[in-house]
Amino acid sequence: MQSLAERQRSFAAALLDPALPAPAGLVGPDGKSSSRRFAVYRNNVIVGLTQTLKDAYPAVHRIVGSEFFHALARAFVVGALPRSPMLFDYGAGLPDFIDRFEPASVLPYLADVARIERAWIEAYHSAEATPIGPSAFSEIDPDLLPDVSLVLHPSVRIVRSRFPALTIWQMNIDGGVPGPVDLAASGENALVVRPEACVEVRSIPNGSPEFIHALGSGRSVSAAFKEAIAADPTFDLSANLSDLIGAGVVVGFAFAQEPLRT
Amino acid sequence: MRFPSSPEDRIPPRAGVGLKAEHYRTIIDTAPDIGFFEVHAENYMGPGGPPHRYLSAIRERYPLSLHGVGLSIGADRPLDEDHIERLRLLRQRYRPGLFSEHLAWSTHDTGFLNDLLPVPYTSETLQRVVEHIDQIQTALGCQMLLENPSTYVAFAESTYAETDFIAEVVRRSGCGLLLDVNNVFVASTNQQWDPVAYIEGYPLASVKEIHLAGNDRQADEAGRPLLIDTHDRPVEDAVWYLYELAVRLVGPVPTLIEWDAEVPPWPTLAGEAERAEVIMSANRPEMPRHAVAG
């Protein structure tokens, strides 16, 4: 009699490889092997994970259509099963996979649309934090402002694209209306954040991604400003700071060597 | 093993439904009269966000049952201790009245296979399952309920009947049972067992919850019926009939309508729960004959 370990090894291998026959000893009521019965398990794995990806990437699904999406999902799933049973976190690798998926190369913006959807899911499930309002911020002595570092909301994500990926995403979510898009037009930067219960996605100007990244890694406002201005000489510090606070991106601040204030 | 349970968290012998995101708002806004809600534990293991906000609000108003789909109790390998710890924290946070998992495996070298895969009923599996349940009950500090599977194949090497295997798991581990009546019907049809004999042979004294769900009817290559446990439609009449039998034997017990795909509008789901409550109130357990005055 084969051991439980051998049984599960052959079962798992055949599940994901349709070229393998159903393992011996898996039988119907007549005691004979039944590939149709084993196929139910094969189907469940692929269909279940495809549905998970479809729920996580609805705009990608809408853009490519059901048939293409199923082929994409199958190719992804067999090479990248979930690492844990927490399926809300499944599919982080799909945007990079789309970049390498040859049949999708005619849609060069698709991976960036997927990156926005992934950022959305991550923001949706991220930890809670309470944004500070403009008044808390206005208490800071203006002379000290350059040395302040900001604590960003844990849900903050930035997606930069060479394409109008944000516009394309908006056209393909629930209630969106697909229309002509000039792919040669300038790229777009998306800021994704969930300050309260709702995930918010907005366009941010050039320089702002560098600014937010620098702030997020703990740099001071003046250091982050230097990064932003290097990326875009027209970067407007006070307008950006006020937009970020208005968007609920900032949950606290600290002066160098001081404990965080939230 | 015996565990204390807090009376205010107890789930009443009424019908409940699986909590779906599609119904969060309706439940909060209309406060429907429903016995309890059940959630898949793994859907609430993220750090924050709307799932926790809604579940917290709903838990304030209703009893909750926690149903795991990812422990892989029937696997050949050790349980994931991080996952057990996540379950422990979730239980601490939401104080569910019941916690259940499956007689199945779902994790292997390649990762999480996202299906409740069947196990052979052998003494090796039995020992493995009992050790795992013991580890879980000790870590969580509560009794867990084990759910009978829906199966599409049988293992040539099995040496126990399914109900005997489950009875032995109960005897050795002290776990309780979740009787999934749709799974009884699906497995019995697929394996050509008698579903009435299955229920009568189940260790009914340990049943603390019942699941009901819909299934899809297909056929195997020999033209024999092959039912698939889909949770995507109403409970069928044969399953309602078996449920009535189970309630007569077990008595009223928390009963869950599982509808996880093609989720219907709230009134349809609530209607299924109401049907289960009607059956519960019409079928009190059979009295011993000598106790009947005559």
Image: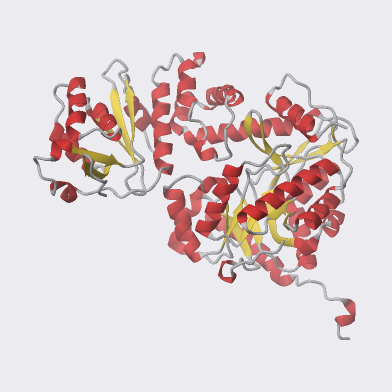
Q: Can you say whether A206 is above or below B283 in the image?
A: above
Q: Residue at x 75, y 68 (%)?
A: B251
Q: Position of residue B278 (x, y in %)?
A: 68, 67
Residue beneath the point at 26% across and 30% down = A214
Closer to us: B127 or B211: B127
Which residue lies at the image location 78% right of the left edge and 71% below the top edge? B285
Residue A2 drawn above or below residue B186: above
Can residue B241 be spotted in the picture?
yes
Residue B115 vs B67, above or below: the answer is above
Q: Is residue B261 visible?
A: no
Residue A140 drawn at (x, y percent): 14, 46
Find residue B82 and report its image quarter: top right
Which quadrant holds residue B151?
top right
Image position, residue A146 (x, y; %): 14, 35
Q: Quadrant of the N terminus of chain A?
A: top right
Residue at the far left in the pictured view: A143
